Image: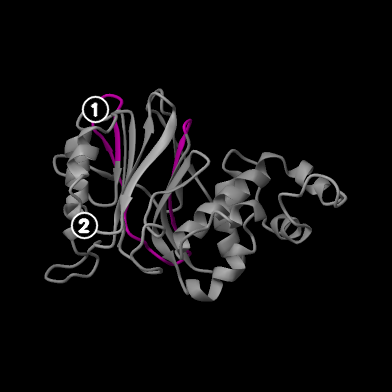
Protein backbone atom coordinates (compact mmCIF):
# COMPACT_ATOMS: atom_id res chain seq x y z
CA UNK A 1 0.00 0.00 0.00
CA UNK A 2 0.99 3.65 -0.24
CA UNK A 3 2.46 5.12 2.92
CA UNK A 4 1.74 8.54 4.44
CA UNK A 5 3.64 10.88 6.73
CA UNK A 6 2.76 14.16 8.44
CA UNK A 7 4.76 16.04 11.03
CA UNK A 8 4.38 19.41 12.74
CA UNK A 9 6.90 21.22 14.98
CA UNK A 10 9.24 18.22 14.79
CA UNK A 11 12.74 18.70 16.23
CA UNK A 12 13.91 15.44 14.59
CA UNK A 13 12.41 15.99 11.17
CA UNK A 14 15.36 14.68 9.12
CA UNK A 15 15.64 11.53 11.22
CA UNK A 16 11.91 10.82 10.97
CA UNK A 17 11.72 11.49 7.22
CA UNK A 18 14.62 9.14 6.51
CA UNK A 19 13.04 6.40 8.60
CA UNK A 20 9.72 6.95 6.84
CA UNK A 21 11.22 6.84 3.33
CA UNK A 22 13.02 3.59 4.16
CA UNK A 23 9.64 2.00 4.88
CA UNK A 24 9.03 1.56 1.16
CA UNK A 25 10.65 -1.87 1.51
CA UNK A 26 8.22 -3.01 4.19
CA UNK A 27 5.67 -5.51 2.92
CA UNK A 28 2.21 -6.11 4.33
CA UNK A 29 3.03 -9.75 5.03
CA UNK A 30 6.33 -11.45 5.96
CA UNK A 31 8.35 -13.10 3.18
CA UNK A 32 6.40 -11.34 0.42
CA UNK A 33 6.73 -8.17 -1.65
CA UNK A 34 3.01 -7.39 -1.34
CA UNK A 35 2.60 -3.87 0.00
CA UNK A 36 6.07 -2.64 -0.89
CA UNK A 37 5.92 0.92 -2.20
CA UNK A 38 8.52 1.21 -4.96
CA UNK A 39 6.65 3.39 -7.44
CA UNK A 40 7.56 6.88 -6.28
CA UNK A 41 7.92 9.21 -3.33
CA UNK A 42 7.25 12.84 -2.58
CA UNK A 43 7.55 15.52 0.07
CA UNK A 44 5.75 18.84 0.60
CA UNK A 45 6.56 21.66 2.97
CA UNK A 46 5.81 25.34 3.50
CA UNK A 47 8.61 27.75 2.63
CA UNK A 48 8.80 30.00 5.73
CA UNK A 49 9.89 32.99 3.64
CA UNK A 50 7.01 32.88 1.16
CA UNK A 51 4.35 30.93 3.09
CA UNK A 52 3.88 28.84 -0.03
CA UNK A 53 4.11 25.10 -0.50
CA UNK A 54 7.07 23.55 -2.26
CA UNK A 55 7.12 19.94 -3.37
CA UNK A 56 9.78 17.45 -4.33
CA UNK A 57 8.80 14.13 -5.86
CA UNK A 58 10.17 11.40 -8.09
CA UNK A 59 8.55 8.36 -9.77
CA UNK A 60 10.97 5.87 -8.19
CA UNK A 61 12.19 4.88 -4.73
CA UNK A 62 14.10 7.47 -2.70
CA UNK A 63 17.34 5.45 -2.57
CA UNK A 64 17.74 5.92 -6.33
CA UNK A 65 17.72 9.71 -5.94
CA UNK A 66 21.16 11.32 -5.62
CA UNK A 67 19.65 14.57 -4.34
CA UNK A 68 17.50 13.20 -1.53
CA UNK A 69 19.93 13.90 1.33
CA UNK A 70 20.19 17.57 0.37
CA UNK A 71 16.40 17.87 0.28
CA UNK A 72 15.77 16.09 3.59
CA UNK A 73 18.52 17.93 5.47
CA UNK A 74 17.16 21.32 4.39
CA UNK A 75 13.51 20.73 5.33
CA UNK A 76 11.92 23.27 7.71
CA UNK A 77 10.72 22.00 11.07
CA UNK A 78 7.30 23.62 11.01
CA UNK A 79 5.39 21.14 8.84
CA UNK A 80 6.26 18.42 6.32
CA UNK A 81 4.08 15.94 4.44
CA UNK A 82 5.41 12.75 2.84
CA UNK A 83 4.09 10.01 0.56
CA UNK A 84 5.49 6.73 -0.77
CA UNK A 85 3.57 5.28 -3.71
CA UNK A 86 2.46 1.75 -4.46
CA UNK A 87 0.66 2.08 -7.76
CA UNK A 88 -2.84 0.74 -8.26
CA UNK A 89 -4.02 2.99 -11.09
CA UNK A 90 -1.63 4.81 -13.41
CA UNK A 91 1.97 4.11 -14.39
CA UNK A 92 5.12 5.30 -12.61
CA UNK A 93 5.30 8.94 -13.67
CA UNK A 94 5.83 12.36 -12.16
CA UNK A 95 2.18 13.28 -12.82
CA UNK A 96 0.92 10.23 -10.92
CA UNK A 97 3.24 10.75 -7.94
CA UNK A 98 2.02 12.42 -4.73
CA UNK A 99 1.82 15.07 -3.33
CA UNK A 100 -0.55 16.85 -5.67
CA UNK A 101 -0.35 20.65 -5.57
CA UNK A 102 -2.94 23.21 -6.64
CA UNK A 103 -3.24 26.87 -5.68
CA UNK A 104 -1.02 26.46 -2.60
CA UNK A 105 -2.91 23.39 -1.36
CA UNK A 106 -1.49 19.88 -1.23
CA UNK A 107 -3.06 16.44 -1.06
CA UNK A 108 -1.87 12.88 -0.48
CA UNK A 109 -3.86 9.66 -0.21
CA UNK A 110 -3.49 5.98 0.37
CA UNK A 111 -6.31 3.63 -0.46
CA UNK A 112 -8.37 3.25 -3.58
CA UNK A 113 -11.64 3.78 -5.36
CA UNK A 114 -12.75 0.23 -6.10
CA UNK A 115 -13.34 -0.29 -9.86
CA UNK A 116 -11.93 3.17 -10.54
CA UNK A 117 -11.78 2.65 -14.32
CA UNK A 118 -15.54 2.07 -14.26
CA UNK A 119 -16.30 5.14 -12.12
CA UNK A 120 -13.65 7.68 -13.23
CA UNK A 121 -15.80 9.50 -15.79
CA UNK A 122 -18.71 9.79 -13.35
CA UNK A 123 -16.46 11.13 -10.55
CA UNK A 124 -14.94 13.68 -12.92
CA UNK A 125 -18.42 14.93 -13.84
CA UNK A 126 -18.75 16.24 -10.26
CA UNK A 127 -15.48 18.20 -10.44
CA UNK A 128 -15.77 21.94 -11.13
CA UNK A 129 -14.91 22.79 -14.72
CA UNK A 130 -12.13 25.20 -13.75
CA UNK A 131 -10.16 22.28 -12.30
CA UNK A 132 -10.37 19.96 -15.31
CA UNK A 133 -7.35 21.46 -17.07
CA UNK A 134 -5.26 20.90 -13.91
CA UNK A 135 -5.76 17.12 -13.92
CA UNK A 136 -2.53 15.74 -15.39
CA UNK A 137 -2.33 12.12 -14.22
CA UNK A 138 -4.34 8.91 -14.27
CA UNK A 139 -4.90 8.20 -10.58
CA UNK A 140 -7.99 8.01 -8.42
CA UNK A 141 -6.08 10.07 -5.83
CA UNK A 142 -5.80 13.11 -8.09
CA UNK A 143 -9.52 13.02 -8.87
CA UNK A 144 -10.25 12.80 -5.14
CA UNK A 145 -8.20 15.97 -4.63
CA UNK A 146 -10.11 17.97 -7.22
CA UNK A 147 -13.42 16.53 -6.08
CA UNK A 148 -12.64 17.77 -2.56
CA UNK A 149 -11.61 21.21 -3.88
CA UNK A 150 -14.88 21.38 -5.83
CA UNK A 151 -16.94 20.61 -2.74
CA UNK A 152 -14.92 23.20 -0.80
CA UNK A 153 -15.80 25.85 -3.38
CA UNK A 154 -19.45 24.85 -3.25
CA UNK A 155 -19.65 24.84 0.55
CA UNK A 156 -18.15 28.34 0.81
CA UNK A 157 -21.34 29.92 -0.47
CA UNK A 158 -24.10 27.57 -1.55
CA UNK A 159 -26.73 30.32 -2.15
CA UNK A 160 -24.41 32.25 -4.48
CA UNK A 161 -23.69 29.24 -6.67
CA UNK A 162 -27.37 28.41 -6.75
CA UNK A 163 -28.08 31.96 -7.93
CA UNK A 164 -25.37 31.70 -10.59
CA UNK A 165 -27.41 29.13 -12.51
CA UNK A 166 -29.55 32.01 -13.83
CA UNK A 167 -26.66 34.09 -15.21
CA UNK A 168 -26.65 34.94 -18.88
CA UNK A 169 -23.93 33.70 -21.17
CA UNK A 170 -22.39 37.19 -21.41
CA UNK A 171 -21.69 37.32 -17.68
CA UNK A 172 -18.85 35.72 -15.71
CA UNK A 173 -18.65 31.97 -16.47
CA UNK A 174 -20.20 29.78 -13.81
CA UNK A 175 -17.96 27.67 -11.63
CA UNK A 176 -20.53 24.88 -11.61
CA UNK A 177 -22.99 23.82 -14.27
CA UNK A 178 -26.70 23.59 -13.47
CA UNK A 179 -26.41 19.83 -13.66
CA UNK A 180 -23.57 19.81 -11.12
CA UNK A 181 -25.44 22.06 -8.68
CA UNK A 182 -28.54 19.90 -8.90
CA UNK A 183 -26.38 16.84 -8.26
CA UNK A 184 -24.64 18.53 -5.32
CA UNK A 185 -27.99 19.42 -3.77
CA UNK A 186 -28.93 15.74 -3.68
CA UNK A 187 -25.97 14.95 -1.41
CA UNK A 188 -27.51 15.11 2.05
CA UNK A 189 -25.09 17.03 4.28
CA UNK A 190 -25.92 19.29 7.22
CA UNK A 191 -24.08 22.64 7.38
CA UNK A 192 -20.84 22.33 9.34
CA UNK A 193 -17.15 23.26 9.24
CA UNK A 194 -16.59 19.78 7.76
CA UNK A 195 -19.13 20.28 4.98
CA UNK A 196 -16.82 19.61 2.02
CA UNK A 197 -15.17 16.52 3.51
CA UNK A 198 -18.52 15.07 4.53
CA UNK A 199 -19.93 15.80 1.07
CA UNK A 200 -17.11 13.90 -0.57
CA UNK A 201 -17.61 10.75 1.45
CA UNK A 202 -21.40 11.02 1.27
CA UNK A 203 -21.01 11.22 -2.51
CA UNK A 204 -19.38 7.80 -2.57
CA UNK A 205 -21.97 6.30 -0.25
CA UNK A 206 -24.91 7.78 -2.17
CA UNK A 207 -23.61 6.41 -5.46
CA UNK A 208 -22.61 3.00 -4.05
CA UNK A 209 -18.95 3.46 -4.96
CA UNK A 210 -16.54 1.77 -2.57
CA UNK A 211 -13.80 4.06 -1.29
CA UNK A 212 -11.06 3.30 1.22
CA UNK A 213 -8.95 6.28 2.12
CA UNK A 214 -6.42 7.78 4.45
CA UNK A 215 -6.18 11.39 3.29
CA UNK A 216 -4.02 14.37 4.20
CA UNK A 217 -5.02 17.79 2.85
CA UNK A 218 -3.06 20.93 3.73
CA UNK A 219 -3.25 24.64 3.06
CA UNK A 220 -0.97 27.29 4.62
CA UNK A 221 -3.46 27.68 7.48
CA UNK A 222 -4.73 24.19 8.24
CA UNK A 223 -4.26 20.47 7.83
CA UNK A 224 -7.15 18.04 7.59
CA UNK A 225 -6.46 14.34 8.07
CA UNK A 226 -9.18 11.80 7.39
CA UNK A 227 -9.43 8.09 8.13
CA UNK A 228 -12.29 6.63 6.10
CA UNK A 229 -13.50 3.24 4.94
CA UNK A 230 -16.69 2.26 3.17
CA UNK A 231 -19.29 0.47 5.30
CA UNK A 232 -18.29 -3.08 6.34
CA UNK A 233 -14.67 -2.44 5.27
CA UNK A 234 -11.78 -2.20 7.71
CA UNK A 235 -8.94 -0.32 6.02
CA UNK A 236 -5.25 0.11 6.76
CA UNK A 237 -4.41 1.84 10.06
CA UNK A 238 -3.29 5.41 10.60
CA UNK A 239 -1.22 6.21 13.70
CA UNK A 240 -0.98 9.36 15.82
CA UNK A 241 2.10 10.22 17.89
CA UNK A 242 3.30 13.15 19.98
CA UNK A 243 6.99 13.67 19.21
CA UNK A 244 7.58 16.57 21.67
CA UNK A 245 5.54 19.15 23.63
CA UNK A 246 3.89 20.64 20.53
CA UNK A 247 5.04 18.15 17.92
CA UNK A 248 2.67 15.88 16.01
CA UNK A 249 3.61 12.83 13.96
CA UNK A 250 1.08 10.87 11.89
CA UNK A 251 2.08 7.81 9.87
CA UNK A 252 0.65 4.70 8.23
CA UNK A 253 3.52 2.61 9.60
CA UNK A 254 4.76 2.97 13.16
CA UNK A 255 8.13 4.66 13.60
CA UNK A 256 10.61 3.46 16.22
CA UNK A 257 10.52 4.71 19.79
CA UNK A 258 6.91 5.91 19.73
CA UNK A 259 3.81 4.61 21.46
CA UNK A 260 1.30 5.19 18.71
CA UNK A 261 -2.46 5.60 19.04
CA UNK A 262 -4.62 4.22 16.23
CA UNK A 263 -6.94 6.79 14.65
CA UNK A 264 -10.52 5.38 14.57
CA UNK A 265 -12.42 4.75 11.34
CA UNK A 266 -14.40 7.62 9.81
CA UNK A 267 -12.58 10.24 11.84
CA UNK A 268 -11.42 13.72 10.86
CA UNK A 269 -8.51 15.49 12.54
CA UNK A 270 -8.24 19.25 12.14
CA UNK A 271 -4.78 20.45 13.18
CA UNK A 272 -3.94 23.98 14.31
CA UNK A 273 -0.44 24.89 13.13
CA UNK A 274 0.16 27.53 15.76
CA UNK A 275 -0.84 25.66 18.90
CA UNK A 276 -0.39 22.05 17.82
CA UNK A 277 -3.90 21.25 19.05
CA UNK A 278 -6.04 18.65 17.31
CA UNK A 279 -9.81 18.90 16.89
CA UNK A 280 -11.37 15.47 16.39
CA UNK A 281 -14.78 14.81 14.83
CA UNK A 282 -16.70 12.06 13.07
CA UNK A 283 -17.27 12.65 9.37
CA UNK A 284 -20.46 10.61 8.91
The x and y percentages for residue 225 are 42, 44
Residue beneath disc 2: 24
| Helix, strand or loop for disc 2 | helix
Q: Position of residue 211 (x, y in %)?
A: 47, 64
On the image, which quarter does residue 272 sit in?
Answer: top left
Residue mark closest to the camera, 2 vs 1: 2
Q: Is 233 inside the magenta-drawn segment?
A: yes
Q: Is residue 123 left or right of residue 79?
A: right
SS class of the residue under badge 1?
loop
| Residue at 17% in and 51% down | 22
Q: Which residues are magenta?
A: 220-249
* Observer able to see residue 83: no
- Rendered image quadrant of residue 232: bottom left
Extreme residue in the left direction: 31
224 lies left or right of 57: right
Q: Quadrant of the N terminus?
A: bottom left
Q: Are marks 2 and 1 in contact (CB under 8 Å)?
A: no
Disc 2: CA contacts within 10 A as few (<14), some (14-19) or many (>=20): many
Q: Magenta includes 237?
A: yes
Residue pictured at 71% horizontal, 60% vertical: 183
Q: How is the image coloured?
A: one colour
In depth, the one of 171 and 151 nearer the eye is 171
- Per the image, the residue denoted by label 1 is 244
Amino acid sequence: MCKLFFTLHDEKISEHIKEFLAQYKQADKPNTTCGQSKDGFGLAWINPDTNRFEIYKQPFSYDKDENIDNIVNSLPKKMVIGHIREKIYGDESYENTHPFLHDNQVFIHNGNVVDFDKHAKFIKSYIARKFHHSIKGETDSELLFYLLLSFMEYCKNKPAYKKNTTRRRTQTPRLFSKKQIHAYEKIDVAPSHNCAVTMMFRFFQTNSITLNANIIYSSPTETIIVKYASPSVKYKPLYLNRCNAKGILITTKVLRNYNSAVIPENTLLHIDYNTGTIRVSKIL
